[in-house]
Image: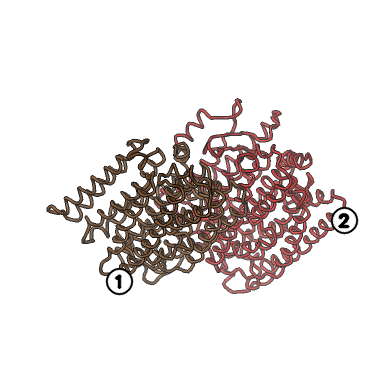
Chain colours: A red, B brown
């Protein structure tokens, strides 16, 4: 603790100019909030401390955004900004190396939105409230740490921190077959981590004992080694991103989790994998990426189509959203596989957009479930009459999911398609067309589910007595809708963040 | 030699107390705990370098640190098992036996001569077999002790045969001299295999592990913790020294032996742990799997191997003792040793549940607990020879082990139970020890200077 404090005051920075933003705050704030939650004495304190903490995190994320834009506008074109490097295990060359570029900033903003919405939506959790909020804040801490780490060991550390909170959240506060889903999720994610670990150690030894991402990105790794390590790393991170066929933990995991858990899992956890696929696997091993790009494209196209068709068969709202997440995240992996700058930018946009959108969708499904106590589409109908606010948000998120212009889904998916079309050979174009066809399928299941649940006749007498959204649910929904609309109507700011970073990655891929 | 002399002093003090007018258990236990604490603290300030008896006994900073770890473990055991210890009828004898075994382990780690090594190994084993029988009225205890003494005697016989063959083929029993005299002849390889087998038996490496589960289950939990943590730790330390400094010319041979045995140990240990219902057998098989991991670290034939193994054993002391400590408290107060009885423990005993959960997460290797760093450094050490498939198998075994550790976590947090364990009042001493272990599990990993310090110790 003293060491952290001293670092604020004196710093151990690699550049000499005034740092507008100290990235350690992004780890300190959630950690302090979590500790404060542990020490609080009653449920009210727990909730308000968590809300205050997540509001602080949201503020820090915006501060980071503005500081970042200011730095870029001032002409600072270093790849990573606000870098800080502290030695941890010197003999093994493991350091606390932090830094952000546009991608990280966007992801951190996404995380802060989802965390505060999650805290708000869970306001009425009665069972073991303190532990619930503690675990939720730990998840946020893991995500923030992951996105700012530039050292593979620390990245892995933050990735793994979230396994047990996810397990406990699903297993204790979940619904349905929660123990089974929690087990499946924990074991499959651990399997992914095992593959990442081996890949990471491979990088460490072949590059002369360095875990540092920036150093590794400048190292020349022989192509044979790259072809060996790339599948390990990509599949390892791919498990987190529901890479077909390792996506089987998603439907059960997301559906059995409590609402805030599903929001976090689908909104952020899947993006950890995508970020890792891009930053670690593709950026550090470009030859391997080019070698396996076609397989990635095939697998993601299958995920997109299979996810969409499987969603059509689902009768449970949460399963609909879970399979739909598999499908939408496939777009990100498709963009990464296409290996053009626009496609990668689109993939990143899709990660941000889908994160906010799916968090909102799970939030609104949770609100409906809290009231009707059923998730089956067949048992619900005409709820628009009794809960107009929730219904409106439901329509908004459904339309965003199927890519209506004006919302973020359209922007992201269009960018991915445009980038994919730039590859002018038959294979890539067919894959692009196949992916585009999934939009029709998406429209089918979204409109069907939304129409049945929200419009039409009311199914049961009790549903007439249900109330609309309370203040916390309204606030959460408004925050997330603001995110969707901000990206959908004025995507320029997001593009400005992501494009230079994607350009750096493309330079590495093309330059070899 | 000073740490051995301190221990001998404590042993004689206990003897005199026993022979003299004797003390009541509570006060005797407090005295012993104080003495062990002083012993632990004192062990940091002793001579760090030196030889005695013409190189038969030597000390280096690393050896001194290893002895400190063992001292710490014994002190924690005396704290954690106070409930059982207060009730046992032969308290001075118990500690006489335990400290004699510890003395044997110290001499074993410091031995510079094959005969001293053998002598101290026997000193380290025989008292433990007597300790295993300490639950005098239970038949299981006697069965465990019998199995242990018979298997130990057999493996000691094999060890002695190996030692005599080494002497026969090299003409020396001094450990530093032997490494110069080895020439890889078939006789020496045979001798090496015999010596290796004896180590494998003591470390419970598959397929020499069959005594472990029964002995661990039969013994009282204090003895089980001693066996699984202190005994294994000490043997691991001397094992590395013997492999790295004595049998260095045979590196290619023992590297592949370690790889194969490590994979077998991890896999079999994990598979058997999946099926266990008794918490002591469960922890026995889990410690077999952990030894498999230690072998992964040892397979790095260089400095990182030693540092990572010593670091891991330090962390393993805390994690395993925390797990055994919680099991000891529950077994002593309620007599329940089955994992099914642990269901719903969180509702009645949240403190014990959190400590057990932390210990299990550390054993599984989940951040931010120290076990994560320990396991990761072992894998980093093992990967240094670029046999990535080996590391992959080890990493995949972490998944299986996570599954069975999560089974216990799930039972405690999520499952419902009609008659859960009633709220147990832990005595302040036990609570303090559990807090020390729990705190160490959370902090030791992040305090990087501990690992850096270990890396600088000369061996």
Label 2, label 1: how many angstroms apart (C-alpha)? 76 Å
Query: Image quadrant of residue A461?
Result: bottom right
On screen, B358 above or below A256? above
Which residue is at 42% across, 44% downward?
B175
Q: Nearer the viewer, residue A445 or B178?
A: B178
Where is residue A101? Give x, y as percent. Answer: 66, 38
Where is residue B422? Give x, y as percent. Answer: 33, 65
Residues packed near mark 1 inside 10 Å, few (<14), some (14 to 19) or many (20 plus)? few
Which residue is at 28% across, 52% downward?
B100
Tag 2 residue: A426
Q: Nearer the viewer, residue B73 or B430?
A: B73
Residues packed near mark 2 inside 10 Å, few (<14), some (14 to 19) or many (20 plus)? few
Q: Is residue A422 left or right of residue A21?
A: right
Considering the numbered disc 2 on the image, is that residue within a helix, a strand or a loop? helix
Marker disc for residue B139: 1
Where is residue A214? Give x, y as percent. Answer: 65, 37
Q: Chain of mark 1?
A: B
Query: Image quadrant of residue A469?
Result: bottom right
> Which quarter of the rendering shows the N terminus of chain A?
top left
Where is residue B396? Give x, y as percent. Answer: 58, 58
């Amino acid at each position: 603790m003293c060491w952290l404090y001293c670092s604020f005051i004196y710093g151990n920075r690699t550049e000499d100019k005034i740092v507008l933003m100290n990235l350690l705050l992004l780890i300190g704030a959630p950690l302090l909030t979590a500790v404060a939650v542990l020490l609080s004495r009653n449920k009210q304190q727990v909730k308000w401390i968590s809300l205050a903490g997540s509001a602080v995190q949201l503020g820090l994320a915006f501060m980071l955004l503005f500081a970042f834009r200011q730095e870029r506008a001032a002409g600072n074109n270093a790849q990573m900004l606000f870098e800080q490097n502290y030695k941890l295990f010197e003999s093994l060359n493991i350091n606390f190396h932090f830094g952000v570029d546009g991608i990280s900033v966007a992801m951190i903003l996404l995380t802060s939105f989802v965390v505060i919405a999650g805290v708000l939506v869970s306001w009425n959790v009665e069972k073991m409230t303190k532990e619930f909020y503690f675990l939720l804040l730990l998840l946020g801490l893991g995500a923030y740490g992951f996105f700012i780490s530039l050292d593979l060991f620390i990245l892995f550390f933050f990735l793994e921190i979230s396994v047990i909170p996810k397990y406990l959240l699903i297993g204790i506060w979940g619904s349905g077959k929660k123990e089974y889903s929690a087990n499946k999720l924990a074991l499959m994610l651990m399997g992914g981590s095992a593959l990442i670990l081996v890949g990471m150690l491979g990088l460490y030894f072949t590059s002369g004992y360095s875990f540092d991402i920036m150093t590794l990105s400048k190292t020349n790794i022989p192509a044979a080694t790259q072809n060996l390590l790339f599948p390990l790393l990509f599949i390892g991170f791919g498990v987190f991103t529901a890479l077909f066929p390792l996506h089987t933990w998603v439907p059960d995991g997301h559906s059995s989790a409590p609402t805030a858990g599903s929001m976090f899992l689908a909104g952020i956890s899947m993006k950890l994998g995508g970020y890792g696929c891009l930053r670690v696997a593709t950026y550090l091993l470009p030859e391997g990426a080019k070698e396996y790009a076609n397989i990635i494209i095939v697998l993601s196209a299958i995920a997109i189509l299979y996810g969409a068709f499987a969603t059509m068969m689902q009768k449970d709202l949460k399963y609909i959203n879970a399979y739909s997440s598999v499908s939408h995240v496939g777009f990100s992996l498709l963009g990464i596989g296409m290996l053009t700058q626009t496609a990668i930018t689109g993939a990143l946009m899709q990660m941000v957009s889908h994160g906010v959108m799916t968090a909102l969708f799970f939030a609104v499904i949770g609100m409906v479930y809290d009231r009707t106590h059923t998730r089956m589409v067949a048992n619900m109908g005409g709820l628009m009459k009794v809960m107009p606010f929730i219904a409106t948000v439901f329509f908004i998120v459904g339309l965003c999911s199927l890519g209506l212009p004006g919302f973020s889904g359209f922007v992201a998916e269009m960018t991915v398609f445009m980038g994919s079309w730039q590859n002018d050979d038959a294979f890539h174009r067919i894959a692009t067309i196949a992916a585009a066809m999934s939009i029709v399928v998406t429209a089918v299941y979204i409109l069907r589910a939304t129409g049945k649940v929200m419009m039409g006749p009311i199914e049961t007498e009790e549903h007439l007595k249900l109330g609309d959204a309370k203040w916390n649910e309204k606030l959460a929904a408004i925050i997330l809708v603001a995110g969707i609309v901000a990206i959908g109507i004025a995507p320029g700011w997001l593009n400005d963040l992501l494009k230079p970073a994607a350009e750096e990655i493309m330079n590495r891929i093309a330059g070899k | 030699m000073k740490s051995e002399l301190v221990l001998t002093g404590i042993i004689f003090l206990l003897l005199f107390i026993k022979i003299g007018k004797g003390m009541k258990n509570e006060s005797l236990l407090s005295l012993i705990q104080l003495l062990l604490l002083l012993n632990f603290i004192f062990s940091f300030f002793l001579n760090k370098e030196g030889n005695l008896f013409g190189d038969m006994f030597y000390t280096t900073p690393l050896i001194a640190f290893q002895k400190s770890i063992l001292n710490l473990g014994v002190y924690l055991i005396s704290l954690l098992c106070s409930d059982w210890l207060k009730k046992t009828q032969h308290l001075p004898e118990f500690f006489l036996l335990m400290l004699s075994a510890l003395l044997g382990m110290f001499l074993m780690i410091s031995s510079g001569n094959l005969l001293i090594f053998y002598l101290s190994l026997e000193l380290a084993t025989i008292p433990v077999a007597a300790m295993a029988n300490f639950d005098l009225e239970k038949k299981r205890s006697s069965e465990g002790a019998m199995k242990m003494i018979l298997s130990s005697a057999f493996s000691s016989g094999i060890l002695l045969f190996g030692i005599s063959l080494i002497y026969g083929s090299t003409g020396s029993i001094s450990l530093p001299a032997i490494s110069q005299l080895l020439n890889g002849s078939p006789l020496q390889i045979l001798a090496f295999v015999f010596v290796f087998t004896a180590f494998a038996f003591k470390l419970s490496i598959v397929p020499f592990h069959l005594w472990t589960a029964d002995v661990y289950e039969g013994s009282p939990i204090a003895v089980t913790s001693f066996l699984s943590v202190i005994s294994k730790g000490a043997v691991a330390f001397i094992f590395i020294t013997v492999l790295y400094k004595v049998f260095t010319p045979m590196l290619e041979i023992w590297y592949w032996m370690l790889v194969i045995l490590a994979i077998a140990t991890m896999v079999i240990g994990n598979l058997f742990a999946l099926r266990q219902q008794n918490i002591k057998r469960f922890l026995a098989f889990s410690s077999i799997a952990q030894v498999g991991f230690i072998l992964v670290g040892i397979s790095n034939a260089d400095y990182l191997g030693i540092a990572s193994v010593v670091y891991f054993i330090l962390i393993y002391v805390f994690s395993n003792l925390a797990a055994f400590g919680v099991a000891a408290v529950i077994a002593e107060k309620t007599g329940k040793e089955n994992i099914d009885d642990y269901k719903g423990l969180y509702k009645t005993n949240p403190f014990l549940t959190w400590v057990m959960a932390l210990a299990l997460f550390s054993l599984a290797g989940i951040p931010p607990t120290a076990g994560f760093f320990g396991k990761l450094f072992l894998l980093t050490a093992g990967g240094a020879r670029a046999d990535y498939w080996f590391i992959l198998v080890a990493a995949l075994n972490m998944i299986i082990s996570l599954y069975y550790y999560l089974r216990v976590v799930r039972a405690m947090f999520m499952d419902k139970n009609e008659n859960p364990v009633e709220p147990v009042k832990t005595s302040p001493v036990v609570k303090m020890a559990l807090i020390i272990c729990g705190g160490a599990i959370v902090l030791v990993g992040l305090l990087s200077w501990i690992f850096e310090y270990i890396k600088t110790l000369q061996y």
